[in-house]
Image (cartoon, rainbow, N blue to C red):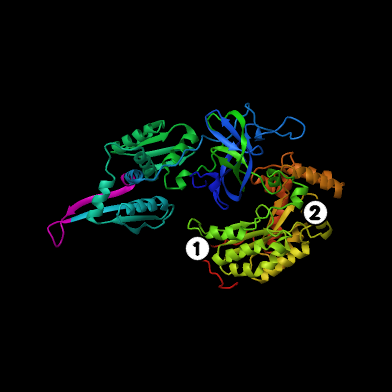
Amino acid sequence: MGDGSSRPLRRVRVGDVIYGTVRRGWYRRYVHTWVLAHWEVVKPAYRVCLCDGRSLITGPDHRFLTERGWKFVTGRMGGIGQRPYLTTNNKLMGMSAFTSPPVVDDDYRRGYLCGMIRGDGLLASYSYSGRRHGTDDVHQFRLALADAEGLARTAEYLRYFQITTREFLFQKPIANRRQMDGIRTYSREAVAEVRNLIAWPSTPSDSWRKGLLAGIFDAEGSFCDGILRISNTCPEIIRRIQEACCCFGFDIAVATSAERRAKPIQILHVRGGLGESLRFLHSTSPAIIRKQSILGQAVKSSADLRIASVEPLGVELPLFDITTGTGDFIADGVVSHNCFARPFHEHLGLSAGLDFESQIFVKEDAPELLRKELMSPKWVPQMVAIGGVTDPYQPNERRLELTRRCLHVFHEFRNPVGIVTKSALVARDRDLLGELARFHAAAVYVSVTTLDAELARKMEPRAATPAARLRAVRELTDAGVPVGVLVAPVIPGLTDHEAPAILEASAAAGALSAGYVLLRLPFAVKDLFVSWLEQHYPRKKERVLSRLRDLRGGKLYDSQWGVRMRGEGEWAEVFGAMFELHRRRVGLADEGPELSAAHFANGRPRQGELFE
């Protein structure tokens, strides 16, 4: 997950921030991405065993990143079903296996408080000569941090042990320093109880040790360039950290700071690279997210990720998969591929051609499931994207009204929603979307590929005409709905010259923002597009394909995030600059509005307030 924790794939939800990878220079590197779709499918199950002992349960059509590129779990060398597949000669790319998080019990809480307060807190009792009495006794506990997560967890654990603290502003943000907030108490009883909580146990449990490591890391730790460090001047704290790390098998190196001080700083760091650092973080579960980031780290590891075996289990099992912004995710430490739109049909055993255009899966109880999800106390109000995989305004939406019924649910809860569509039918729902927009909780993005009606008929025969899409933009805008236009897909040599005219027409229709996406041709979509060019534009075929290859390093498709949407090279730079110039000329922003969940109805739908 994007916050450094791990979660079973079945519990991942659309909108979650997770880690994916992109290629930068010689290496793929870890980046944040978003979950765009989540699904479950029943398929024949396979077990992929690695030489380091971990095993992955997956379907035959899933793909993993190897030292030789993406490979399916199963395949053939030739004939029907020919495709690259895993063998015992392959090595997967990724990191060490994930470790289960700790159980948060009383011992863990005590350990965390011990590490945090001894590392960064003030706990004191003293006397001084007072004005009214001979002496005054003062008892004080104080903890101030720039990271809210560590402070919140400490306050929560203290409350659990019946110790109440008060929040206060410790330091305003100045120059290059962030704001620091704090918690404190001056109660004699509370200070005495804090001392009791953080006392060194005579026989510490494993749970207490994990809490200690999490607390001292939040207080005095850092994680930079794949190296995890903890610093302190107290010999007893250093000894306890070493003892706990040794208990869990961590190889610790200790160095003394060269800085001359009365109390020298001891610096401990975890050996073993990124894999061991992540094992430390996962098994101890610190609170501060910033300190657990692996952004920009290269995808390389000392773990033995060679394939030991790939074996069928002989049964069909429910399997889970997701679609992400980068096209991949990290499954138990290894880089795993996901599917998207037409390839998703192949994932379900259908073709990316005729089946994609003629068969659609309908979840008739989607509105009821959505309402149940939004009413759950676990739901965190956030923007929900509709249309990330398949257009929500399919032709049979006129009859089923599934999307409209879902919008009723979003309206009941005032939960923000963003829609991407190429259908003019979206204008039908401008009443619901307009009401949501009053609370900054709705935005629509309409795809406009071309203004040429004849080209549109050939390219998207069952979609709304360009004129109808622009009318939908105007109708939504008049209803108060913020609308953006996506010039997508841009086909070099066929539609790229239309971008300035599309931008001008979109601005005239009332759009507020605009963006573009170059044509993507993953998997079987590539062959379908080549056949389409041969049928409709045979004279332009080679020009279009040649330009696409120039944009993607000699290939028709490149799955790298950032590259697959924009391309690389001189043409990509020229087109991007031209698009930016005309976008500014007609007054369109480069991003849509930021949606807000501030008016979410807190699980109590406002049935009947506006729409019966």
**Residue 560 spot, x, y in % from top left:** 65, 43
Q: Residues within 10 Å of mark 2 (few under 14, many from 20)?
A: some
- Magenta stretch: give its range: 117-136
Q: State whether residue 322 is above or below residue 185.
A: above
Q: Earlier in the sequence, mark 2 or mark 1?
A: 2
Q: Is residue 566 visible?
A: yes
How many angstroms separate mark 2 from mark 1 (CA)?
A: 43 Å
The residue carrying mark 1 is 603
Q: Tell me which residue sits at (39%, 58%) in the image.
A: 172
Tag shown at residue 459: 2
Residue 601 as seen in the image, left or right of residue 113? right
Residue 350 as seen in the image, left or right of residue 48? right
Residue 339 as seen in the image, left or right of residue 194? right
Q: Residues within 10 Å of mark 1 (few under 14, many from 20)?
A: some
Does dot 1 land on a helix, a strand or a loop? loop
Depth check, front residue: 563 or 165: 165
Residue at far right of view: 539
Residue 525 lies in the magenta stretch: no
Q: Is residue 254 visible?
A: no
Q: Write down the quadrant of residue 346 in the picture.
A: top right
Which amino acid type is marked by label 1? Answer: Gly
**Residue 384 spot, x, y in % from top left:** 59, 57
